[in-house]
Image: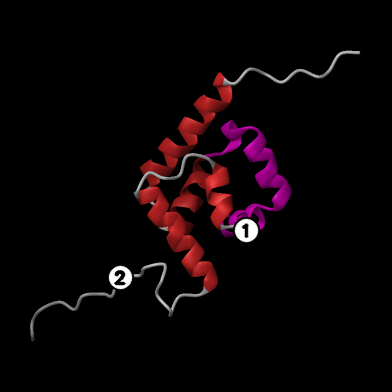
Amino acid sequence: MAGQPKKEPSKKSSDPKLTKSDRKRQKIKEAFEKDQMKTFNDIFVIMDETPFGLLIGLQKKQLEAKLANLEKFNFKDIRRISEAFEIDFDKVVAFIVSLVKAQHARPAVKGKSK
């Protein structure tokens, strides 16, 4: 009808017009919206580390360093994740904070003594 705003078609991960990369980003977004993302490994099941890192502006070694010590994720990294995957910023913050807490709760791994 005239005068009514047009509805934008929803982008579902099954939409044939989306590229493979778009579908992966959409799956990650949907999983965040359903609170199904608990670790970065959950993300990496859908999208490999390297393309994930590149989407958020990190080279492989930079991403690996941040994954080893999650406290190294900064505001810019969180904002880039939020924007790249169209995820609410606060959800990404909560995700990172929960992972940092879990990382601190684990006992430190000590080297083997001879």
Q: Is residue 5 above or below residue 25?
A: below
Which residue in the protein does label 1 denote?
A: 54
> Which residue sits at x=51%, y=32%?
99
Range of residues picked out in magenta: 48-74
Residue in front for this viewpoint, 19 or 53: 19
Residue in front for this viewpoint, 48 or 81: 48
What secondary structure is the stretch in magenta mostly built from?
helix
Q: Is residue 50 above or below residue 10?
A: above
In this rendering, position of residue 23 left or right of residue 58: left
> Which residue sits at x=44%, y=51%?
82
The extreme right residue here reads 114
Neighbourhood count class around disc 1 (C-alpha, 10 Å): few under 14, some 14–19, many 20 upward: few
In this rendering, position of residue 49 left or right of residue 16: right
Residue 15: percent from left, percent from top? 40, 75
Residue in front for this viewpoint, 70 or 32: 32
Residue 103: percent from left, percent from top? 57, 26
> Which residue sits at x=43%, y=62%?
26
Which residue in the protein does label 2 denote?
A: 10
Q: Amino acid at mark 2?
A: Ser
* Circle 1: element type: helix
> Which residue sits at x=50%, y=52%?
80
Neighbourhood count class around disc 2 (C-alpha, 10 Å): few under 14, some 14–19, many 20 upward: few
